[in-house]
Structures are given as C-alpha cells and as structure tokens.
Image (spheres, grey):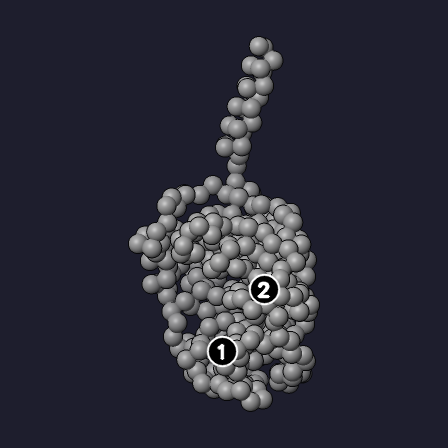
Amino acid sequence: MRIVYYILLSCCVFVLAACSSPDPEFPREETLTLELMPLQGITDPFSLEIKHPFLIFRNSSSRRDSILHIYDLNTYELKSVFGRRGRGPGEFISPGLLRSQLPYFVIMDDQGDMVTYFFDIDEEGRPALNDTKRLAYDGDPNIAIINDSLYVNDDMFVSRTLQVFGFDDKQPRRTWRYGNPAIMNPWTDPNRGSLYANEERIVFCYDLMKQIDFMDTDLNLINRVKFRYDSPGVVTEENMNEVKRNYSVSYLGKRYLYALFLGASWEKYGNDPDFRGSILEVFDLNGNPVIRYRMDGIAPGHFVVDEQTFTLYGFHRNFGPEDHLLVYRLKGL
C-alpha cells in the first residue's frame, strides 16, 4: 500500500511540475526600429522572396502584367519586371511565388496541372529559367520546398496532415497528422497552422495555439516549443475572427526560424494596417530560443529575412497599392 502511495505521489508531483513549467526563455531581447524601402511604380504586394542581394516581389492576382519585380537590395533599385497573364513564354495563369532556401527562386503556376518553374537571377537582376517540373500529385497543393526533388504539402482541406512528396510522386512518402478532419471547416480547427521547410527542417507554426513543431524532413518530431496561452476554446465560423492569433506569419531561413507572435484577433489585426506591438521570436533549427524582438513599428503581414545582412523586409496587410516595404534590421544575430 505504501508503494502505491509513493507512486501516486510521484505522479502528482510530475503532473504539477509539467503544468507549472515555465515558458521557454529567450536569452536576449531587443527593440526594432522601423525603416522604409521605397518601391517603384504601382505595386500591390502579395508575396516576397529573397535571394541575396536580390528581393523578388510578386504583385496580387489583380495585375495582368508586371506581376513580378526584382530589386537590388544594395541600392533599392528596381532591376527587372516580368510576368504576364497567358500561356506563352514568360506568361502565367495563376502564379504563386514559393519561398525556399534553394539558390534560385520558384514560381508555381496552375495551368490545369501544377507547373513549377525554377529561375536563376543574373548579375544584372534579370530572371533566367533554370528548370521546369510538373507535380504528379493531383490534389490541392499548399507546399513548402525542401530541396530540388522534395517538397512537403499541407493537406489542410481534406486530411489535416503534412505530407512529404517527391515531384514525381502521386502518393506521399510520409504523413503526419496535426488536426481533426472531422471538423468540417478547416479554419475552425484549433490545430491549424502554417508550414515552412528548408533542406534540414520542416516547421509547423500553430495559428491558434502558442506552439511550434520542429521536424526533420521525414516528419520525425525533433522539438515541440510550447508556451502558456489562452485556449481558444470552441472555434466556430461565428467567432473565429475574434479568437487571438499566435504564429500566423513566420519565415524559415537556413539558420533560424523567425516567428511573428501577433497576440491579437484577426478582427483587431487584420482590419488595422498600422497594427503595432508584435513580437518577433527567433529560434535555431532545433527549436531553441535565440532572441526576442519587440517591434516599435507596424507589424508586417508577410515578410522575408535576408540572412546575409539579417534584415527583415515585409509589407502591410491592407491588400492595396504600396509605395514602400517595411524594413527591420535584426540586431544581435
């Protein structure tokens, strides 16, 4: 009987310790000051990619031409403009600018099947087609590039799994479940998140939980970074815009994950293009906290980080013409 008592006592102590365990600690904190990078021409930002010293800028789908811009980050000069709607050379039907740590930038276009274009950038800032691949997978792709032969897909609308594919694969090589497919609307699944990948890691940042999962490229969990947070409870179509968002926007480089903690609902953040007070949390590729930055300026709705200069480039989330990008220089990395 005494042995049973001590076992129960030990279990209670373990549970209490787990429940009261402190949040992961960041060894350093800094404050970031907003700068602006001027843009040229009429621009309607939708996504960014970076290949030092060039930044690739994709306009929204409302543009029929000049879809993609390439800037020199040393001079902020617009070096080239390309991409039109159509099916001819240099034309796209519905192009998406994918982020990767490959030496070239990647455009995925829906032409009935998904065509992936790999572009180099020459010394003058002009794009040069390197390779073209078609996805054998015929589902709804929401992908992050691992390398030039592998990608990971977030099947959020059907199975709520992450899936590793080769470009020639019709079926996934590996799968990892994160959500509940019984919830009909994926946007109300409290386990939903955003997917990122590089040649070493797959990272899943949760939107409604303050949690980040770091995995290897076979979807084996390496580290689960978890903070105390206010549970969203039951998320419905009626209240989902009132639920606090956590890691809705992040960027995975070769060296670090840069996770923007919002701590605000979409109703507050999404409707305020000048929303301030966000925190940028930086982790190494094993999920260890490195540094926390408090932003004294506008929170970007989408951003990339140049790891050659540790400079963040982003834009508002107001979905309209812009004459500048938001710039934050990440001190201490």
- Looking at the image, which residue is at 58% across and 51% down? 176
Q: Nearer the viewer, residue 40 or 163?
A: 163
- Looking at the image, which residue is at 65% across and 66% down? 169
Name the spot of residue 267 as percent of width and height, x first.
33, 58
Q: Residues within 10 Å of mark 1 (few under 14, many from 20)?
A: some
Tell me the amino acid under the disc marked 2.
Ala
Whether residue 175 sits left or right of residue 228 in the image: it is: right
Q: Residues within 10 Å of mark 2 (few under 14, many from 20)?
A: many
Name the spot of residue 46 as percent of width and height, x first.
46, 72
Whether residue 181 sits left or right of residue 244 in the image: it is: right
Marks 1/2: CA distance? 17 Å
Tell me the amino acid under the disc marked 1.
Ser
> For residue 137, which quarter of the picture?
bottom right
Q: Nearer the viewer, residue 270 or 79?
A: 270
Residue 144 circle label? 2
Name the spot of residue 205 as percent of width and height, x first.
52, 54
Q: Secondary structure at mark 1?
A: loop
**Vertical position of residue 307 compared to residue 39: above or below:** above
**Vertical position of residue 92 compared to residue 281: above or below:** below
> What residue would you read off at disc 1?
94
Name the spot of residue 6 as percent of width and height, x first.
58, 16
